[in-house]
Amino acid sequence: MHRYFPIEEYETRWARVHDEIARRGFETAVVFGRGGGTTDNCGDVLYLSNHYAISGGMDSLIWTARSFAGVILQPGRAPQLHIDEPEVRRDLVSIDDVLSSNHPFESVAKSLVERGVKGRVALVGTHFIPIKYYRQLEAIAPDIEWVPADDLVRSVRRIKSRLELDCYRYAGETATLGVNALMEGLVGGLSEREAAGEAARVVVARGGRIQMIGTNHGETLGFDQRFPLTGYSEDVPVVAISSPARCMARSIRAIISIRVARPCADKPMPSSYVSSRRQAASCTACRTCCAPA
């Protein structure tokens, strides 16, 4: 396997975050993230390092803070990644300096002490770091004043690079092709399993991964496809409507209102998918669309 983005993309990201660190008056920042499939807050660490933790779990005598990872950022120095996995995927991770530990918060704090870091340090992730692990930072690095800066990396990564925009376009094309294959199969008489298989074939052939394709028949046909490229996730809920045009128009208006109102999440916002004929994204049952006002 290989990274989706070249190393130059990550070097540009690090430089931009370093500039933001300096602009805010810090000399050091620590960015924490959490993967492992439970309440993911992986975006910032994934953006900086392309690392995603795959193992969750409760604390034990062996480890603490499973699925957490931290990145130490200091302008003028290469970033350092702290992970809880026993080995680093060198073919995927963009950071060379990687430390593996059963206690990632303690590992980060010890590294900062070894570097002689004192005073104000920007801390990214206070909205999901448990008090227990925060106290590990305080205990090991008592001379550090941890200053919450949860939007530090997010303020940088909201401006997408050319390569990121190309990634969005490719993901959108792939999702559309997968949707088309599924819906054409369902409308054309294939079983749900056969139609889902055709959609998965299209997506996987273009480098994507399918998490689920849950289809159902009824007044509407629906499915949910997830297409995560490296560092990006696209959820494509779809409902097909074989009803009058006013039903389709009302559904599309509902989609637009949902997209506009949806708050900025850790995952980048995918583009809406709406195609002609019998397909529209995310709609309620037809009787609801056509109900009298």
Image (cartoon, rainbow, N blue to C red):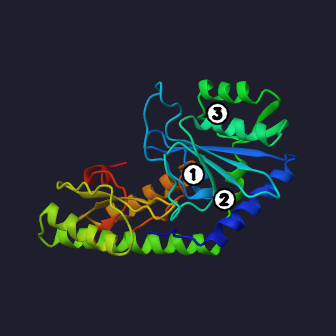
Left or right position of 225 against 255: left
Name above or below for residue 134 compared with residue 164: above
Residue 158 vs residue 246, the one in the foreground = 158
Percent of width and height locating residue 202: 30, 74
Residue 90 vs residue 252, the one in the foreground = 90
Q: Secondary structure at mark 3?
A: helix
> Mark 2 Cα within 10 Å, few/some/many (few <14, many 20+)?
some
| Mark 2 lies on residue | 157
**Mark 2 near mark 1, Cβ–Cβ under 8 Å?**
yes
Q: CA distance from mark 2 to mark 1?
A: 9 Å
Q: CA distance from mark 3 to mark 1?
A: 22 Å
> Would residue 160 be visible to someone looking at this image?
no
Name above or below for residue 230 compared with residue 162: above
> Mark 1 Cα within 10 Å, few/some/many (few <14, many 20+)?
many
> Can you say which quadrant of the picture contains the N terminus?
bottom left
The amino acid pointed to by label 2 is Arg
Report the residue at 88% width, 47% height from top. 25
Left or right position of 14 against 200: right
Q: Secondary structure at mark 1?
A: helix
The amino acid pointed to by label 1 is Gly
The amino acid pointed to by label 3 is Glu
Percent of width and height locating residue 219: 19, 55
| Mark 3 lies on residue | 106
| Of marks 3 and 1, the one in the foreground | 3
- Specify which label sits upstream in the sequence, 3 or 2: 3
Report the residue at 52% width, 42% height from top. 84
User: For residue 211, what is the image quadrant?
Assistant: bottom left
Residue 43 is marked as: 1
Percent of width and height locating residue 158: 66, 59
User: For residue 19, what is the image quadrant?
Assistant: bottom right
Report the residue at 56% width, 70% height from top. 5
> Mark 3 Cα within 10 Å, few/some/many (few <14, many 20+)?
many
